[in-house]
Amino acid sequence: MKRVVYTAHLEFRLKIRDIPHHLPKRIFQEAKEHYYDTATGHYVAIDKCEFQGKIREMALTYDNKRYAAEIITIHPIKAYQKHSRISSGRWKKI
């Protein structure tokens, strides 16, 4: 299993969005959906989890570095946003 590294931007987002610190690593390791974002050149992992009292899909943006998976940011994503990015071809399933 690849080592997981949190960027400073991710640490900031975790604080302002009040997301538990362990959640990005869990999503990266357990997500069944991984995509390549052709617009940004980053990878995206999607997984459902409890967030603010609801079960939500969370999008995790990361880069695959030689030494580790570097997690850039995390945010809740709505079903229509995910569907739109997949159907437009922006996100390619990996």
Image (spheres, rainbow, N blue to C red):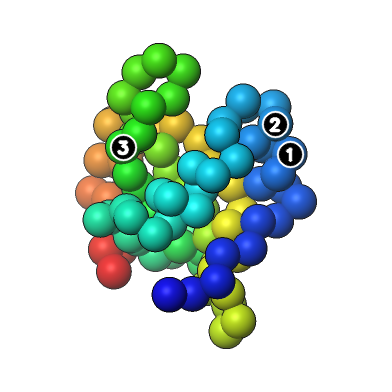
Residue position marked by numbered label 1 in the rendering: 12
| Residue 32 visible in this rendered orientation of the protein | yes
From this viewpoint, which residue is outermost toward the top? 53
Characterize the local packing of mark 1: few (<14), some (14-19) or many (20 or more) Cα atoms within 10 angstroms: few
> Residue 31: which numbered mark, if any?
none
Amino acid beneath label 2: Lys
> Residue 48: which numbered mark, if any?
3
Marks 2 and 3, how far apart in space? Answer: 20 Å
Tell me where residue 94 appears, x and y as whole percent.
29, 69
Looking at the image, is mark 2 or mark 3 earlier in the sequence? 2
Amino acid beneath label 1: Phe
Amino acid beneath label 3: Lys
| Element under disc 1 | helix
Q: Tell me the residue at 49%/59% (across/down).
A: 39
| Pick the front one: 1 or 44 | 1
Report which quarter residue 20 is drawn in.
Answer: top right
With respect to residue 30, does 12 lie above or below? above
| Pick the front one: 88 or 70 | 70
> Residue 15: which numbered mark, if any?
2
